[in-house]
Image (spheres, coloured by chain):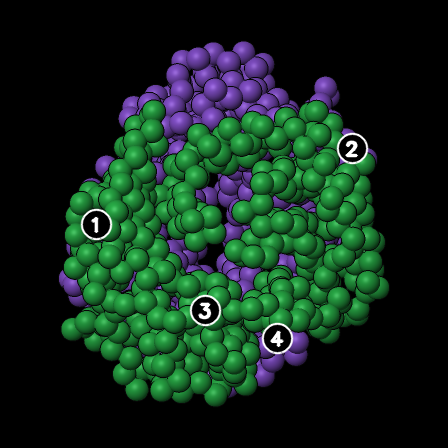
Chain colours: A green, B purple
Amino acid sequence: MRRKQKTMAKQQERQDSYQLGNGLMILGEPMPDVESASFYFLLPAGSAYLPDGCCGAGEVITDWMLRGAGSRNSRQLIETLDGLGIHHNTSVSAEHLSLSASLEADNVPAAMELCADILTAPMLTDDQFEPSKQLALHELAALDDDPQQKVRMLVSEQYYPSPYNRPTEGKPAELENLTTQRCRQIIRDQFDWSKCIFSIAGKYDFQTICDILEKRFSALAGTKVKTPLPGSRGQHYFHEPNDGAQVHIGLMTTVPTVRDVRYYDIMAAVSILSGSMSSRLFTEVREKRGLCYAVGARYKSLKDFAAISGYAGTTPEQAQETLDVMIDQFRQLRKGISDDEMHRAKIGLKSSLIMQCESSATRAAGIAADHAHLGRVRTMQEIRDAIEAVSVSSVLAFLNDNLFEDFTVATIGPKPIQH
Amino acid sequence: MTFKHKQLSNGLTLIGEMHPAAQTVAMGFFVRTGSRDETPEVSGVSHFLEHMMFKGTDDLNWQQVNEAFDGIGAKFNAFTGEENTVYYAAVLSEFLPDVARLWSKLMRPSLRDDDFNIEKNVIQQEIAMYKDMPQFEVLDQARALHFGSHPCGNSVLGTEASIAAMTADQMRRYFSRRYAPNNLVAAACGNFEFDQLCDQVESLCSHWKPEESGRQLSSFDGTQSRKALRKENLARHHICMISPCVSMQDPRRFAASLLSMIIGDDSGSRYYWSLVDCAIAETASMQAETMDGVGAMYSYLCCEPDNAEKVTSIVANIFDQIAKDGVSENEVQTAKNKILSAMAIKSEQPMGRIFGLGFNWIYAKQYRTLADDIASVRAVTAEDINRLIAEYKPGHFTCLEMGPKV
């Protein structure tokens, strides 16, 4: 068991950490002058970890777990959460299943007890299962009316290797086949408490936090879940016909993960490409050519796979040109970056960093993600120094090793385009 | 936390809320203009103009504008609604003078013809984008149906035809009337010195000339009409219901927010238990929108096309019940806790405070601290909400539905 309280030069950079005997990691970062706090439970039980044929089980399970836990039935549980003003959320990614909460600081201990009930003592009654499954099916069907969102799902499905490409929203036939027994089994087999991460940011008392987690989680064991091995990837181009007003274009191209030493060079490159309104994509696609309203790209990283993911929505007549200009802009980057562009990218990254630290929810999520991907939490000073060290030549060196030769593309719209 | 305000002789108002512990400042201009201030021939001009404001001034082109914001790491944007157009940015405190100078300059744009013509395409693209978002379109069409001839039913985006026909001259005329200093509020929130900011804004904006830029105000109870649109390419059935509500100037707006939360919050509300918990609808929400001299309660529901009738009949039951029995003390207390904690979370960042700060001034010439709002929420009783229900009758609504099986 290790206890740690590291205090940096400035008060706001204190980092708290404590590991339970079973391996559960507790991380905290206090924020000055706020009356609120946010916390995260992160479990390595995302869609990639599911057994075959259960795509979407994470969505069903997280909804089902909220339908009664501990001594409270569904209605009592929701009423207690709401009564404490807890803004709670569950989410499922390829790697993780998470439960998060934001609330007034005074109610943190009570909220943690409730979340511990949800995670470790959900009722999972038979009668509450079907509505959870039906809601997951409905939400999946509703994606057809939200093509902007759906095209991101489609391109991820083609880009990532299996099973990391499974849509977290599920697949209709596999959702239909889910049963109570199957989902209970998934919870038993996949919830590995030895790899759980708890993070908190805002106003809190670390000793109280540790005491609650020790009491509620220290007796829970790990499981034998292994990190899934990557399999094959999907198609280079995928089109879904839809009689809408626009063609929605999603694209992904490979870059190194957050663990790579060139991570901040990648972040600067993404920022130059699409960090703001003076960036290349916005300037070339929207401002100079008026091809679309929405265009952008961002960095996305799982532990072992990363990509720059782009989106644009445009009319069918302009779709081909939009895609061609976007891809060209990725490739043009290595031909030169001005000092002004580099300055803007660096100041933009630093400014985002400081603003993220003013929001407890963003910071708590960042702490948990750092630990999951890097095995440690970066300090603000470390990130600031790393951004400072980025230069035109370091970014160009990265771009010359990473030529953006291959793009996975998905479109939704009246007709396909050439790729 | 302290508050200061100042009005320049040309009518421009400056307001500031100082938080010495913050590391950032949010700063922007609130313009009291939106789609309700438009005539049919310039439908969509407020929103189109908002885009054009970023195209530059006589000594800055659009590229220099974007580079100037990005050069100080500003997180900036703008939005246009039925009655306000807001330009805002968050920056590290040291960059406030830069961002204040930039916004002050941009509030007097060139509105060049060639920029106007390129941006027209972008607006047409934006209109096309929203056509593919039924959750937005149903709301837009329901608003037009509910407000009928009242200007609050005007579309923010305008139509393909109104945008195509619009000229840069029409936009310039609209600009000079609506962006007069007496129709603008400059607001800042975070770590900064108010007097320094005032001196700077005054030196840049005091030569602007005031204009007559009022607004026709009238309350409106809605048409209570119903319309159903068949759209073959939709997968789900989308419903929007609108009923009248109190205005932003009415102190009962806090009771209205609590009522919308009791009926339609995404967790633990009446809609939640009757529709979402049992998987009859995947989305069922209600919001109170209090506006200038008028207000509306909006419900949005999304479900499987075969469940549409069931959903509307359950909603009708919820409204009947609430009209008959009112809300309970317990429901009110829960809704209060949810709102109060949302306020605490939102106020973590200057960017979370700036909109409340600006709108309180725009609508009521009033400064309200977070503590004032907390006290107003705490003071609402179940009886207050029940009186509101009796007067505004949320069950008497306008309804617009669209789906594949209508």
Dividing the picture into quadrants, the one containing residue A249 is bottom right
Name the chain under label 2.
A
Q: Nearer the viewer, mark 4 or mark 3?
A: 3
Residue displayed at 42% across by 67% down: A45
Residue displayed at 66% across by 76% down: B233
Task: Estimate the x, y position of residue B313 in percent, counting from the top left.
Answer: 39, 81
**Tag 4: residue type?**
Leu
| Gap in angstroms between the C-alphas marked 4 and 3 | 41 Å
Residue displayed at 42% across by 63% down: A44
Are discs 2 and 4 less than 8 Å apart at CB? no
- Badge 3 element: loop
Q: Which residue is mark 4?
A: B234
Are discs 4 and 3 less than 8 Å apart at CB? no
| Gap in angstroms between the C-alphas marked 3 and 2 | 43 Å
- Badge 4 element: loop
Residue displayed at 57% across by 81% down: B406
Task: Estimate the x, y position of residue A148 in percent, counting from the top left.
Answer: 62, 61
Q: Which residue is mark 3?
A: A226
Task: Estimate the x, y position of residue A250 in percent, counting from the top left.
Answer: 68, 60
**Tag 2: residue type?**
Gly
Mark seen at residue A296: none
User: What number of labels is visible?
Assistant: 4
Mark seen at residue A336: 2
| Gap in angstroms between the C-alphas marked 1 and 4 | 48 Å
Name the chain under label 1.
A
Whether B297 is drawn above or below B187: the answer is: below
**Tag 3: residue type?**
Lys
Name the chain under label 3.
A
Q: Nearer the viewer, residue B153 or B23?
A: B23
